[in-house]
Image (cartoon, rainbow, N blue to C red):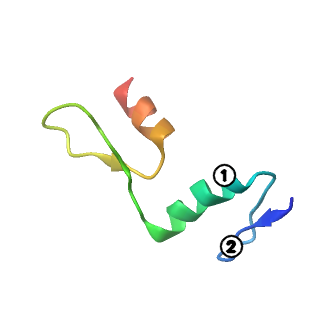
Amino acid sequence: RPYRCTICPRGFYQDRDLQRHIDTHTGTRYYHCPVQGCDKVYTREDRVTRHMK
């Protein structure tokens, strides 16, 4: 796995997967739930999708 996390031992085959993983370490949260009145915010778009189900 050519893309290695510098914070933990995880490795990834694609750079985009590493970048998504790095956000879990930094606490950066880009994805807000679109439901009015819901204040949930997530680091990954797929987590918002799962939250919506």
Which amino acid is tagged 1? Answer: Arg
Label 2: how many Cα within 10 Å (few below 14, some 14–19, many 20+): few
- Of the image marks 2 and 1, the number of the one nearer the N terminus: 2
Q: Nearer the viewer, residue 8 or 12?
A: 12
Q: Residue at x 48, y 70 (%)?
A: 26
On the image, the x and y values in percent for residue 29 come to 38, 56
* Image position of 9 (left or right of 28): right
Going by the picture, which residue comes out furthest to the left?
37
Q: Taking 7 as reference, is 28 left or right?
A: left
Mark 1, other Cα within 10 Å: few <14 / some 14–19 / many ≥20: few
Drawn side of residue 38 relative to residue 8, left or right: left
Image disc number at residue 8: 2
Q: What secondary structure is marked by label 2?
A: loop
Q: Give the residue drawn at x 48%, y 46%.
A: 44
Q: Which residue is mark 1?
A: 16
Q: Is residue 52 above or below residue 9?
A: above
Q: Residue at x 72, y 56 (%)?
A: 15
CB contact under 8 Å: marks 2 and 1: no
**Residue 3, located in which quarter of the rendered image?**
bottom right
Which residue is farthest right?
1
**Which amino acid lies under the numbered mark 2 shown in the image of this protein?**
Cys
Q: Is residue 19 above or below residue 53?
A: below
Q: Secondary structure at mark 1?
A: helix
Labels 2, 1: front one: 1
Query: Would you place residue 28 above or below residue 39 in this image?
Result: below
Q: CA distance from mark 2 to mark 1?
A: 17 Å
Using residue 6 as the reference point, say whether residue 37 is left or right of it: left
Query: Which residue: 13% across, 37% down?
Result: 37
Quadrant for the N terminus, please. bottom right
Examine the image and state in which quarter residue 21 appears.
Answer: bottom right
> Looking at the image, which residue sits at the far bottom?
6
